[in-house]
Image (cartoon, helix red, strand yellow):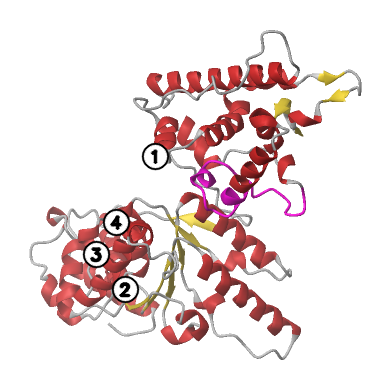
Amino acid sequence: MNPILPSATRFLERELQWLKQFISARISIYFQQKGAPATMDQYPPPDVTVETGFYAEFVKKHQLDRTQRLLLILAMAPHLRPQTLDMFCLKNKNLDRYYVEFGGVQVEGHGGFWPTLETVAFLLGSNDLEQRSALMQLFTQIRNNESALIQALDFSHIDDHGSAFNSQLKITENFLSRLFLGKAHSPAFNHNFPAQKITTALNWDDLVLPSDVLEEVEEIKTWIEHHQTLLEDWQLRDKIQPGFRSLFYGPSGTGKTLTATLLGKATQLPVYRVDLSMIVSKYIGETEKNLELVFKQAERNEWILFFDEADAIFGKRSQNKTSNDRYANQEVAFLLQRIENFPGVILLASNLRSNIDEAFSRRFQSVIHFPVPTLEQRYLLWQKAFSSQERVAPDIDFYEIAEEHEITGGAIVNVLRTSSLMALRQGAEHVTLIDIQQAVRREFRKTGHMA
């Protein structure tokens, strides 16, 4: 079933009809055809006030003006109705070529006209230098992530040394996915894109942390929800950097990854875990290139970036004794600058705070220690893990188990899985105390400790 509702489709039809009329009128004015309108002022964009659907809501939310809407619907036209742009396929008979003032580029696999920024400039008045200058400013704002259109338009393919007006108008995959599928686009996890979306079925109430740790985590949540108010309404943009950077450190299994995931779930922002092993490359420049792909997508789509085992690449820099040392330190310097300029939320996780380069630590808004849970916290974690009472033998005392074993929340989840599988293998209806004790011993053997 197509998620574009009839009401949303009607608005897109009106927007495409407006584009068609706009192009036809502009061409007739340009060629001084008989009956051409005097100005383009009689072609305002359709009223969006009462319209619904993803596209209409995007236009309303960001209060897009005529130029911005023209730019957006023109970029969408090859996907929605490419024949709308056939009017640009005119040849200049005197020069035996297409009109350069119309712009447009050849795109592999697309037989029609694909618009460029030059196409927008033509529609707005190709000889009007003021309009051209304003369009160039808008293009720069989009590329610098200073315009809401960064969520819809992708100019990352543009060579900085080329002409901006020759830039192909491309719609982001995420915008198209939301328009046609009704959901956000999740890039495929591979060597070209070394980040993977992480989710959880748990909720904020399932987070078991010391009260002081939870308060620091709540501060990040408050920033996500209210940073625009702080920067804009309170006018602190000149004093406070955009973005929030936090280091989570503590033993494995203490809730660092779960906390990152729940922050995203609570604020409705996707969380992407960056695979550092896929980023680090032996080829000079590849590390920065791989990271930049992730950062660009994260900026455009408002992702939270989570770097697990961050000391693998954010660790202490070595002395420049060899060329490899110098290049490794260049990578760290690049990361330091990129993270500092990132306007969103970045979370780094490490087992030990001392493993992280001090230059990074100074730039964190918070450094949060995730300790091994106390007895009371362990008891709560055992209860939450084995919440299905009908699957637990009645003689099990989780407080006694929590008192006997100093174990993390992550390890308790592993015990839940192992002991449940033991019960199923034996054909039992309940997890027994013996199952749990055996699973605990196995968990301790994994870490080289005795239960």
How far is the residue under mark 2 from the one under mark 4?
29 Å
Would residue 96 appear left or right of 17 to someone viewing this image? Answer: right
Asked whether residue 140 appears in the rendered view, the answer is yes
Residue found at x 55% / y 40%: 173
Q: Provide the residue designation for mark 2.
A: 254
The mark that comes first in sequence, 3 or 4, is: 3
Of 157 and 436, the residue lying toward us: 157
Q: Earlier in the sequence, mark 2 or mark 4?
A: 2
- Residue visible at 76% across and 17% down in the picture: 31
Nearer to us in this view, 232 or 426:
232
Q: Nearer the viewer, residue 92 or 379?
A: 92
The residue mark sitting in front, 2 or 4, is: 2
Residue at 18% across, 81% down: 404
Q: Is residue 182 something that shows in the picture?
A: no
At label 3, counting other C-alpha atoms closer than 10 Å, the crowd grade (few under 14, some 14-19, many 20 or more) is some
- Give the mark, 2 or 3, whose residue is nearer the N terminus: 3
State the residue position of label 4. 425
Q: Nearer the viewer, mark 1 or mark 2?
A: 1
Q: CA distance from mark 1 to mark 4?
A: 55 Å
The amino acid type, in three-letter code, at marker 1 is Lys
